[in-house]
Amino acid sequence: MEPSIETLAEKKLVGKRVRMSLTGNRTGELWKSFLPRRKEIQNSVGSELYSMQVYEPGYFREFNPAKEFEKWAAVEVTDFKVVPVEMETFTLPPGLYAIFHYKGLSIDTSIYQYIYTTWLPASEYLLDNRPHFEVLGQKYKNGDPDSEEDIWVPIKLG
């Protein structure tokens, strides 16, 4: 599976976040608190949802499934003028990304194993220290093997 390589322009996101680890996965809890309230965000751009991970520098140097990171459930917005109560803003910085179009169950981690242990080491790129995210569009169906999403991995030339 070869990704497309794109330069992302800065994006403004509004949503909710939690700290979690892979062993202490709180993704379901995050989305259950966000989805019922997403319509409160009045200035959204498009209908896509963003599932974003913000890792500390060095997170990937030594893999530890108990190491915490920040997970976001968000939508893109035109500006931060109106932010619903209990929601936060995040400015996604511009930069180069490898985009993998994935079809399958979101709980299947084999795509991530492929990206980080096969594709990335064989590519001319290095992992960059910017947020990782998935764009969940019209074809995303949680828990469905026919679900589709785009996985955005921040990269830089090696």
Image (cartoon, rainbow, N blue to C red):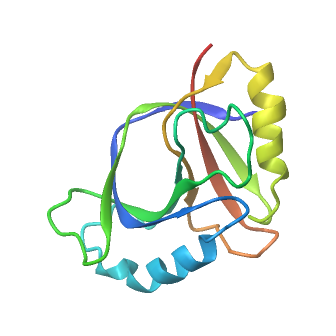
Residue 113: x %, y % from top left: 82, 43
Q: Nearer the viewer, residue 20 or 150?
A: 20
User: Quick check: can you spot residue 1?
Assistant: no
Figure quadrant of residue 62: top right
Q: Quadrant of the C terminus?
A: top right
Would residue 146 be found to the left or right of residue 33 on screen? right
Q: Is residue 125 above or below residue 82?
A: above
Of all residues, the one furthest to the left in this rendering is 81
Of all residues, the one furthest to the bottom in this rendering is 36
Q: Nearer the viewer, residue 15 or 22?
A: 22
Q: Which residue is located at x 61 percent, y 70 percent?
A: 27
Would residue 117 be found to the left or right of residue 91 on screen? right
Q: Which residue is located at x 74 percent, y 27 percent?
A: 120
Residue 125: x %, y % from top left: 65, 20
Q: Is residue 13 above or below residue 154?
A: below
Q: Is residue 2 above or below residue 43?
A: above
Q: Nearer the viewer, residue 126 or 104?
A: 126
Would residue 88 be found to the left or right of residue 74 on screen? left
Residue 93: x %, y % from top left: 37, 38
